[in-house]
Image (cartoon, rainbow, N blue to C red):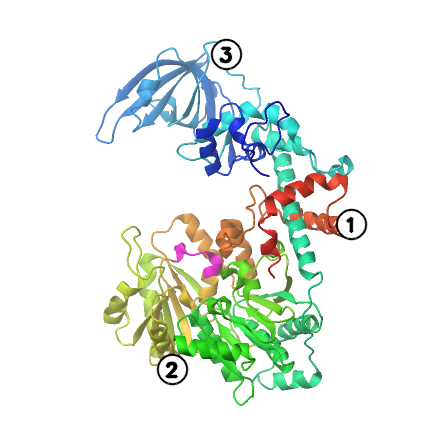
């Protein structure tokens, strides 16, 4: 919806009108509101609270220690006590059943706000002070002189708490929304017919918006939340499906067939038998490649499940059909490793492979670009350099993107080739909960490798508190003495003045001189020159370096068979899925892997969260927990994806609602793909407004 530059003088108010022209706003406040995303009337009424504080009123004589309660009475006395810790302001509150104390610490200004005889409503947690009930640092609301006594039979008050800023506090937003809501609610259009809502047990949209701001009971609020969440998920699913439909309409791709002979030749390249899970993934991919429309498939699986081998199989099918393949990795380190690994599998073959990164010298890069455009290279492995200006493939048949979520998603469509669109295979080693895959990767067909190759024992994971760290290091030293190798991971490259965290560069000396002095210790981080990183990594792979001190640059794809131990410092600083990725670097050579999660004096909830990793090595269970705790944006780093933020829907708790929305979206798109029917006009309007800049992203697959 677009802001209107001038007030809608003489005409009926519209949801698309600028919020500036509502009573109590004006130009200055409109600027502040725009800063929190409120530009139109619709934005204002859909600016929902973060939470509601439930205030249950009590007479003073019925207050109980530990409860959160609201009391109404008059101030009988006010006094201030000074100490080295600052001023404490106390007030005696009295109703017709007794007295209690209200106390504020380090809040001398409260003394100026209070006066004897003032009628107030105070809400806070109840304690006891000198045999009187006491509310500590309570929220206070001044009432009129005619305020009556508390009626304990009255329903609880729900006080909305809005996302706020220093200049736009929650109370000001609540007042603005509350003052305008009655005249704005009639503008809200219903999206669905009464029968549609009844079948899905959904309340009306107007009723839901009103209750989101001013619920009367818990059930009222939950019904409202359910309806608004459903609407958000339905819109997202419709956008995903329309984009997918548009993506595939009229777009041709190379038909890449896989004969029995091609299959036999490819499998001879692998010195091991593929697992049943890998074979299932390959069947799906080969079926897609043989069609004249582009494959758009997400290949996901747990750490060490063998996704890279499946991707190489697909690449060799393309090469066998005289087509080029681009393989894009998120870091130079991983690009180099893919190049080494693929080159090893292709030893003695006629497949022409090259590595393209951003750090190559100009002459070398120019020659490589000429070879790519001339069709003289079959497989090009690279980083973001693959999508830079000047990279033109002669006959690009397949694009493989590793760790998809690390790229801005629009980049999927930026690898350039001549002629038909290439097929796309995107991979992630971060197992994605189904609810998240349906939204973030909804335009992709999803294939999951759900089993590990035989012989990989589960990694033993231990949560190590400060007092236990000595014995953990003893264990690591014992494994090193057996000829094994270890990683030590730190959250920072260098020390920070703002964060009391150990850093890789400063801890290197301590490890070399004290903790692991008998072994060669190397350093690896993302700020090193690529040649230096390659040297260090080469020394570690060859065993000349036994311990690698690193940052999360090793999170993805690094494969050193003799590395069996990993120590992760400040483990509480990482997400669960990232920790799972990191520990997947050990135990890859047949020996059991060990991971020690070193914590500082972490909060109880951090230790509880980390215990999930101790209890399971199932990446999908860990991903579900990570989604529940941190949300999709933090979990996948998808804040840059372009998806409108879900304000109310919660992918961790609304899986059933999402599936219902997906079914409804499928039916709607199947029956009215352009949303031209009159009954779909409200959906079409809001979809265009919210997803205008996002459909392109959704269609980038």
Indicate the secondary structure of the residue bearing disc 1. Answer: helix
- Residue drawn at x 60%, y 82% is 273
The residue stretch that appears in magenta: 571-578
Q: Is residue 318 magenta?
A: no
Residue 378 percent across, percent down from the top left: 56, 80
- Residue drawn at x 45%, y 76% is 366
Q: Name the foreground residue: 29 vs 405.
A: 29
Residues packed near mark 3 inside 10 Å, few (<14), some (14 to 19) or many (20 plus): few
Q: CA distance from mark 1 to mark 3?
A: 58 Å
Q: Name the foreground residue: 99 vs 454.
A: 454
Q: Which mark is residue 671?
A: 1
Residue 512 percent across, percent down from the top left: 26, 71
Q: CA distance from mark 2 to mark 1?
A: 61 Å
Indicate the secondary structure of the residue bearing disc 2. Answer: helix
Task: Give the mark, 1 or 3, whose residue is nearer the N terminus.
Answer: 3
User: To which residue does mark 3 refer?
Assistant: 148
Residue 548 percent across, percent down from the top left: 35, 72
Question: In this rendering, is residue 143 above or below 565?
Answer: above
Task: Give the mark, 2 or 1, whose residue is nearer the N terminus.
Answer: 2
- Residue drawn at x 45%, y 34% is 31
Question: In this rendering, is residue 678 above or below 264?
Answer: above
Q: CA distance from mark 3 to mark 2?
A: 82 Å
């Amino acid at each position: 919806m677009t802001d209107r530059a001038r007030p809608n003088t003489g005409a009926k108010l519209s949801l698309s009108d600028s919020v500036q022209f509502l009573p109590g706003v004006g130009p200055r406040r409109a600027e502040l509101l725009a800063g929190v995303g409120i530009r139109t009337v619709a934005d204002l009424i859909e600016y929902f609270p973060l939470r509601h504080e439930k205030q249950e009123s009590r007479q003073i004589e019925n207050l109980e220690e530990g409860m959160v309660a609201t009391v109404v009475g008059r101030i009988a006395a006010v006094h201030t006590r000074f100490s080295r810790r600052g001023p404490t302001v106390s007030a005696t509150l009295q109703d017709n059943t007794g007295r209690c104390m209200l106390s504020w610490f380090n809040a001398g200004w409260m003394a100026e706000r209070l006066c004897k005889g003032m009628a107030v409503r105070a809400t806070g947690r109840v304690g006891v002070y000198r045999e009187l009930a006491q509310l500590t640092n309570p929220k206070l609301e001044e009432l009129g002189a005619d305020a009556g006594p508390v009626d304990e039979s009255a329903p609880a008050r729900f006080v909305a708490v809005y996302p706020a800023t220093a200049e736009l506090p929650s109370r000001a937003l609540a007042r603005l929304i509350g003052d305008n809501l009655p005249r704005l609610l009639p503008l809200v259009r219903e999206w669905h017919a009464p029968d549609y809502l009844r079948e899905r047990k959904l309340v009306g949209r107007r009723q839901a918006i009103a209750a989101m701001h001013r619920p009367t009971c818990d059930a009222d609020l939950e019904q409202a939340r359910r309806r608004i969440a459903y609407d958000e998920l339905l819109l997202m699913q419709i956008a995903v499906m329309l984009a997918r439909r548009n993506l595939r309409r009229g777009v041709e791709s190379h038909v890449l067939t896989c004969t029995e002979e091609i299959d036999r030749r490819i499998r001879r390249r692998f010195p091991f038998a593929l697992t049943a899970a890998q074979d299932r993934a390959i069947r799906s991919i080969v079926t897609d490649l043989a069609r004249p429309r582009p494959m758009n498939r997400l290949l996901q699986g747990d750490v060490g499940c063998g996704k890279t081998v499946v991707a190489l199989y697909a690449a060799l099918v393309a090469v066998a059909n005289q087509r080029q393949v681009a393989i894009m990795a998120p870091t130079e380190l991983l690009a180099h490793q893919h190049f080494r690994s693929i080159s090893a599998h292709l030893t003695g073959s006629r497949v022409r492979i090259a590595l393209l990164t951003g750090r190559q010298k100009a002459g070398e890069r120019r020659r490589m670009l000429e070879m790519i455009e001339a069709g003289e290279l079959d497989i090009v492995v690279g980083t973001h350099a693959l999508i830079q200006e000047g990279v033109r493939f002669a006959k690009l048949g397949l694009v493989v993107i590793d760790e998809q979520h690390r790229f801005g998603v629009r980049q999927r469509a930026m690898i350039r080739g001549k002629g038909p669109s290439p097929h796309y295979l995107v991979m992630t080693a971060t197992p994605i909960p189904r609810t998240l895959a349906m939204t973030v990767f909804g335009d992709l067909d999803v294939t999951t490798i759900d089993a590990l190759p035989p012989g990989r024992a589960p990694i033993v994971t231990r949560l190590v508190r400060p007092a236990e760290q000595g014995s953990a290091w003893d264990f690591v030293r014992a494994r090193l003495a057996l000829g094994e190798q270890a990683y030590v991971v730190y959250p920072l490259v260098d020390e920070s003045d703002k964060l009391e965290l150990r850093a890789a560069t400063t801890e290197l000396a301590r490890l070399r001189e004290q903790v692991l002095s008998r072994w060669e210790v190397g350093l690896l981080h993302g700020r090193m020159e690529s040649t230096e990183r390659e040297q260090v990594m080469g020394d570690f792979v060859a065993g000349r370096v036994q311990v690698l001190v690193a940052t999360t640059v090793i999170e993805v794809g690094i494969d050193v068979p003799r590395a069996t131990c990993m120590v992760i410092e400040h483990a509480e600083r990482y997400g669960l899925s990232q920790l799972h990725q990191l520990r997947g670097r050990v135990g890859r050579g047949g020996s059991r892997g060990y991971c020690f999660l070193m914590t500082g004096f972490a909060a109880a909830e951090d230790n509880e969260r980390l215990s999930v990793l101790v209890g399971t090595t199932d990446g999908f269970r860990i991903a579900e927990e990570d989604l529940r705790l941190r949300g999709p944006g933090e979990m996948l780093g998808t804040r840059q994806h372009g998806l409108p933020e879900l304000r109310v829907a919660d992918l961790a708790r609304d899986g059933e609602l999402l599936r219902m929305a997906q079914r409804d979206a499928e039916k709607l798109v199947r029956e009215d793909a352009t949303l031209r029917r009159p009954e779909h006009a409200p959906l079409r309007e809001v979809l265009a407004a919210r997803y205008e800049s996002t459909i392109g992203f959704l269609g980038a697959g």
